[in-house]
Image (cartoon, rainbow, N blue to C red):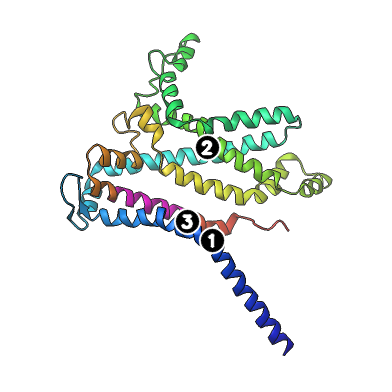
Amino acid sequence: MCKLKKARFLRNNKVKDNITAYAFLSPAIVLYTLFIGGPVIATVVLSLFKYNLLVSPQFVGLQNFKILFSDPLTWQVIGNTMLFTAVLVPIHVIIGLLLASLVSHERNPFLKYIYRTSVYFPSILTTASVAVAWYYMFNYDYGVFNWILKSIGLESIPWLTSPRWVVLTISLFSLWKFVGTPFLYYLIGLQNIPSGYYDAAKIDGANGIQTFFRITLPLLSPTMFFVITITIINTFQIFDEPYIITHGGPGNATKTLALYIYEKSFKSYEMGFSSAVAFCLFIIVFIFTAIQLALQKKWVTYDYE
């Protein structure tokens, strides 16, 4: 009888806790539904119409999607976006982790502050302004990078006009501009790892590499999972860098899905078609995020015990 009453008491408390939690979450849920769910639904609906802002919307069903997937440019744009994702995600994740590890081991508080500020500072600058600056630095005729190459006897590189070099150019800019965000997440994650693990490893005679791979990486895996997920999502939506630096060129080599959506929406005014492209981008991001969530059980450690 006592066990039954105790079970009911615990169950009632759990229900009350759930109600309280949902009550606190309800404002965020409402705002999320209005500002995220609403636009997604509107995009899906609009993708079924032919609409160019000048005439009334005409229902065309899946015609926009048929045109979308039969256009070779669509597949090139998807390929460009995938290429940027394949390049940018690993370098942001790995270099952000290496920088955070180096800074976390710095003993001098002043130097640690300088390093931390130097790495993160570009992240708070507006992308448009620094992208323009980088555009001029990468200019073939008078850019500072080619000036350095010529000053040491090397040939100038067509950073912005060669499809072979332009992806590297934008990737370098993106790394400099945005690596501060994963760096900061990693730095916080490293500070939250209990020092007792490292003390025990030192007593057992583990070297730095063994400590990094056996202690730091497993305990930092939740942070790494978060960094990988948000980096994938952000990279699939890359827009500012190719738009400002190359305008999608040369020869559509840097035209991404986000830039394609912008051009179809605000240059061609094909709102229905651009909505179809946006919905495809949403599906791609959703699939990659779902894969990440499914795979996290195999490598993410949430328990420090």
| Furthest-right residue in this view | 203
Examine the rendered structure and indicate whether residue 161 appears above or below residue 224. above
| Furthest-bottom residue in this view | 1
> Badge 1 is on which residue?
25
Q: Looking at the image, which residue is at 67% across and 37% down?
A: 101
Kind of residue indicated by mark 2: Ile
Residue range corresponding to the magenta coloring? 276-289
Q: Looking at the image, which residue is at 59% across and 31% down?
A: 119
Kind of residue indicated by mark 1: Leu
- Are the residues flagged by discs 1 and 2 in contact, CB closer than 8 Å? no
Q: Looking at the image, which residue is at 35% across and 32% down?
A: 243
State how far apart marks 2 and 3 are (Cα): 20 Å
Residue 159 image point, x, y percent: 40, 23
Q: Secondary structure at mark 3?
A: helix
N-term-proximal mark, 2 vs 3: 2
Examine the rendered structure and indicate whether residue 82 appears above or below residue 118. below
N-term-proximal mark, 3 vs 1: 1
State how far apart marks 3 and 1 are (Cα): 26 Å
State how far apart marks 1 and 2 are (Cα): 35 Å
Q: Is residue 226 left or right of residue 84?
A: right
> Badge 3 is on which residue?
291
> Badge 2 is on which residue?
91
For the residues carrying marks 3 and 1, which lies nearer the camera in this image? 1
Residue 77 image point, x, y percent: 32, 41
N-term-proximal mark, 1 vs 2: 1
Q: Looking at the image, which residue is at 68% across and 44% down?
A: 190
Q: Secondary structure at mark 1?
A: helix
Place residue 96 in its image quadrant. Answer: top right
- 10 Å neighbourhood of mark 3: few (<14), some, or many (≥20)? few
Q: Based on the picture, tell me whether residue 239 belongs to the magenta stretch.
A: no
Q: Secondary structure at mark 2?
A: helix
